[in-house]
C-alpha cells in the first residue's frame, strides 16, 4: 500500500499546478457554504444576545431597524434626533429606567457614546483601569478603542470635527481619558463613552469663556462699565474642560430640548414593559418605541433566507465543479496512457494501477477537505471578531 501512495504522491507533486488547482477548487466548494453557515450563525447569535440585553428603545419615528442598529451597535444615526425630554418621560413614568444615547460624533475613528453612568451598570461594564467619568470633558474608552489608540487613564483624546467647514456648530473637544473598560466582546469595546452633556458641548450647545473680569483678560476687553463688560473676538470658546474653567461652562437653552438619538428603557418587569409600550402607542408625537429582539428576529430571519438561497446556488455550482474535476481526472488518465502502459509492462497489475489512480483522487480530496476544515474552524473561532471589526 505504501508504494501505491508513494507513486500517487510523486505524480501529484510533479504536476504541482494541476494539483493546486484541483485542491483549491475542492477546498472552496466545501469551505464557502460552511463558512457562510458559520458566519450567519455567529452574526445571529451576536445580534440576538445584544438585543436580549436591551428590552426597549425609544427614538424618532421611522425605520425600526435603523434605530436598533444605531442604538445597539453604534452605527451612524440615520433618523432625526429626539429631545432629552423623552428620557424624562420614560423615567417619569415610574415603569422603567432611562439612559440617553447621543451617537453623532467620533474621536480617533471610534464612536462617541453620550449617555449616563447608569449605562455602564446596565451593560455590566467594568473598569479595568482608572475610574468612571464624573464631570464634563471626561471619557471612558472601550478595550479595543484604548488598545488601538494606545491611550490609558491620564491621556487625552480629541473629538473629530463634524466637517471641514463647520465653523459655527461643533468644534473639537480635548477630552480627558479617565478609565478603560474591561473587554466584553461587544460593541462597547469600540466606544468612547462620555456623559451626554459632554456631547452637547461638542455639539456647541454649551461652552465656557475666559473670566473677563479677571485683570489677566484685560487685552480681550473692548469696554467696561458698572453693569457690563464687552469682550472682543480674542475671548474664544474653550476646547478643553479643566478644573480651572469648568465653572465657566454653561448651556444655551433648555436642556430638555437638547438632542439625543435614542433612549434605552429598562422596565422593572414584563408588566411595566407592556404598560410603557401601550403609552407610547397612544402618543401623537413623532416618536416610536421598539423591542430590539423583535427587530433582530426579523433581521435574522432575512439572513437565514439569504443563506439558504446562497447555499442552494453553491450546491449547484459545487456539483458542476465536481463534475468538471471528474472530467479532468478522466482526461488525465487518457493522456497518461503511455505511462500506464509502461507500468503494466514492468509488472503492475490492472488493480494496482487503478489503486494508484484512486489514491491520487483521494489525496487531492483529503487535502481539500483538510484545508476547508481549517478555514471553517478559523471562521468559527474568529468570525465574530471579524464581523465586529467590519462593522466598526
Image (cartoon, helix red, strand yellow):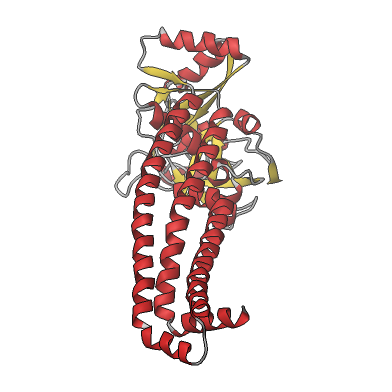
Q: Is 179 displayed left or right of 335 in the figure? A: right
Q: Decide if residue 301 is on the left or right side of residue 51.
A: left
Query: Residue 30's x, y, as percent?
Result: 46, 57
> Left or right: where does residue 272 sit relative to residue 219?
right
The one of 53 and 26 positioned closer to us in this rendering? 26
- Quadrant of the image containing the N terminus: bottom right
Residue 150 percent across, percent down from the top left:
58, 58
* View extreme (left): residue: 165
In this rendering, the answer to whether 196 lies above or below 10 is above
Question: Which of these two is toward me, 328 or 342?
Answer: 342
Relative to residue 238, is residue 71 depicted above or below? above
Relative to 48, 228 lies left or right: left
The image position of residue 29, as x and y in percent, is 42, 58
Q: Position of residue 152 (x, y in %)?
A: 63, 53
Residue that appears at 40% across and 30% down: 65
Question: In the current view of this chain or complex, which residue is farthest to the bottom?
Answer: 346
Amino acid at each position: 500500500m505504501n508504494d501505491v501512495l508513494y507513486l500517487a504522491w510523486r505524480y501529484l507533486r510533479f504536476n504541482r499546478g494541476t494539483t493546486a488547482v484541483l485542491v483549491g477548487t475542492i477546498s472552496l466548494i466545501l469551505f464557502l457554504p460552511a463558512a457562510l453557515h458559520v458566519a450567519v450563525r455567529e452574526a445571529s447569535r451576536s445580534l440576538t444576545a445584544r438585543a436580549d440585553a436591551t428590552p426597549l428603545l425609544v427614538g424618532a419615528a421611522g425605520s425600526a431597524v435603523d434605530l436598533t442598529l444605531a442604538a445597539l451597535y453604534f452605527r451612524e444615526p440615520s433618523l432625526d434626533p429626539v429631545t432629552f425630554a423623552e428620557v424624562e418621560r420614560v423615567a417619569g413614568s415610574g415603569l422603567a429606567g432611562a439612559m440617553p444615547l447621543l451617537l453623532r460624533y467620533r474621536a480617533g475613528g471610534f464612536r462617541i457614546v453620550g449617555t449616563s453612568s447608569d449605562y455602564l451598570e446596565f451593560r455590566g461594564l467594568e473598569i479595568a483601569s482608572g475610574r468612571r467619568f464624573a464631570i464634563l470633558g471626561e471619557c471612558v474608552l472601550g478595550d479595543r478603542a484604548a488598545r488601538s489608540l494606545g491611550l490609558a487613564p491620564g491621556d487625552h483624546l480629541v473629538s473629530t470635527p463634524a466637517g471641514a467647514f463647520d465653523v459655527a456648530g461643533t468644534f473639537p473637544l480635548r477630552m480627558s481619558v479617565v478609565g478603560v473598560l474591561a473587554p466584553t466582546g461587544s460593541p462597547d469595546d469600540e466606544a468612547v463613552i462620555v456623559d451626554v452633556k459632554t456631547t452637547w458641548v461638542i455639539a456647541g450647545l454649551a461652552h465656557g469663556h475666559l473670566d473677563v473680569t479677571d485683570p489677566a483678560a484685560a487685552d480681550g476687553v473692548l469696554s467696561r462699565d458698572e453693569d457690563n463688560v464687552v469682550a472682543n473676538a480674542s475671548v474664544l470658546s474653550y476646547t478643553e474642560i479643566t478644573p480651572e474653567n469648568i465653572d465657566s461652562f454653561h448651556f444655551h437653552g433648555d436642556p430638555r430640548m437638547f438632542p439625543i438619538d435614542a433612549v434605552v428603557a429598562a422596565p422593572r418587569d414584563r408588566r411595566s414593559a407592556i404598560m410603557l409600550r401601550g403609552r407610547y402607542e397612544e402618543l401623537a408625537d413623532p416618536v416610536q418605541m421598539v423591542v430590539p429582539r423583535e427587530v433582530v428576529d426579523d433581521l435574522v430571519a432575512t439572513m437565514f433566507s439569504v443563506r439558504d438561497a446562497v447555499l442552494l446556488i453553491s450546491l449547484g455550482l459545487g456539483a458542476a465543479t465536481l463534475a468538471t474535476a471528474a472530467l479532468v481526472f478522466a482526461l488525465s488518465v487518457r493522456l497518461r496512457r503511455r505511462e500506464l502502459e509502461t507500468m503494466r509492462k514492468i509488472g503492475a497489475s490492472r488493480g494496482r494501477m487503478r489503486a494508484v489512480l484512486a489514491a491520487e483522487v483521494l489525496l487531492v480530496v483529503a487535502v481539500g477537505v483538510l484545508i476547508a476544515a481549517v478555514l471553517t474552524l478559523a471562521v468559527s473561532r474568529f468570525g465574530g471578531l471579524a464581523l465586529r471589526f467590519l462593522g466598526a
